[in-house]
Amino acid sequence: MPFDSEMTVAAGDETLFTSQASGSIRGYISVYSPSALFVGKKDPAIASADMATDMMRQHRQALEEWVAVQKQQYDQEIAGKDILEQRQWLIDNPRSLFASEILANLASHTPRRNSLGWHRENVSLFPGYVAFLSEEDALWFAGPDGQRVIDLVDAARRGTSQSILAAQVEAQGPYKLFSDEEIRRLRKSGLSSDLIAAMIRSGTQPAAQPDTTASLATSPRASQQETLAALLIPDNSGEYMSPWTSDGVLAEWVDKAINAKMGSAVGSAAGAYAAQKALNNVPFIGGFLGSKVGKEVGRTAAISASGGMDYIRQTSDQSFRSLDDMARYLKTVHASSSNFQDAIKAADAIYPGLMQSLASAE
């Protein structure tokens, strides 16, 4: 039985490296004449484990060789370059494995004059640059493209009505929950309290408005139900799919993930073992790729085991705008379900951070 294995390293939608390996498992039979005589491997699980280990070794070796070549090229080409030359090199080599090193250099070599302009220029060139900014500088780049905080400051200074800006950002968001110090800095930059409040509210749906045709007493329970209803999107248009359907049963993608146990969905003992190895022992070496890449590979494998992102969305009829909304709703509505833990583990593999949000949900 022949098997093929492929390992891919990707950054966003771009494939940086691909390694392919192959292996096979020989079947076995038993003949009684007069005692049992086994021909071939006695235990297919051992055979599949040996084969998967060999394929992972091939992947590791190929990856190490590729990283070594990338590192040598990077060291040779970047040696002696000043910060502007490094930036130009990154513009010319956007897929470099060591792009993060240059981005970190750009963020740490901020000019004394017009530092914000330096950051804006770099953000326009490299969207990932924001991740390397200090918390203080990153504040100005919170929000969606075209309406980041710094864009709103510019618009307000040009005379655009802040009431109009508030309506726009509340509809487009999200931004973040600003600290008291950040609010003080935003106010100092010229943004109004109403605009800042709209930024904080962005990305959330207001609670249902009371019916103006009748006056009805609202019980605490009804109020809670309205709050929960505001958290939930009654279709699959949100960013985060609900593990439960509107009928109160687990979505098909959750059942698939639980039954697959993040590996057996590959369809064979060899595939299950290889998938488990890919999740638990990602063969990234040194500090070149980092834990974030490893986590993303694990998430990719989890999505695959759940049927793929399109399947997850197609088999969901409820969704949420944020992990916090999902956590609050699920904790209130489904925490007593017998399959709650399994469903949350499956969902957390697809949407990392859900368990953390659950821990802090009220």
Image (spheres, rainbow, N blue to C red):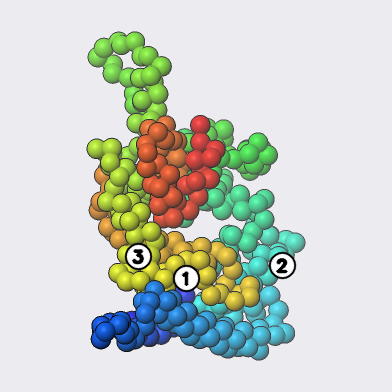
Give the mark, 2 or 1, whose residue is nearer the N terminus: 2
Neighbourhood count class around disc 1 (C-alpha, 10 Å): few under 14, some 14–19, many 20 upward: some
Q: Nearer the viewer, mark 2 or mark 3?
A: 3
Question: Identity of the amino acid at label 1?
Answer: Lys
Write the residue at 57% across / 72% down: 289
Q: Residues within 10 Å of mark 3 (few under 14, many from 20)?
A: some
For this orientation, the residue located farthest to the front is 34
Labels 2 and 1 touching (C-beta < 8 A): no
Q: Secondary structure at mark 1?
A: helix
* Mark 2 vs 3, N-terminal side: 2
In this view, the mark in front (2 or 1): 1
Disc 2 and disc 3 in contact, CB within 8 angstroms: no
| Label 3 secondary element | helix
Q: Nearer the viewer, residue 177 or 248?
A: 248
Q: CA distance from mark 2 to mark 1?
A: 40 Å
Image height check: is 174 above or below 137?
above
Q: Which circle's residue, 1 or 3, is located before the other in the chain?
A: 3
Which disc number belongs to residue 277?
A: 1
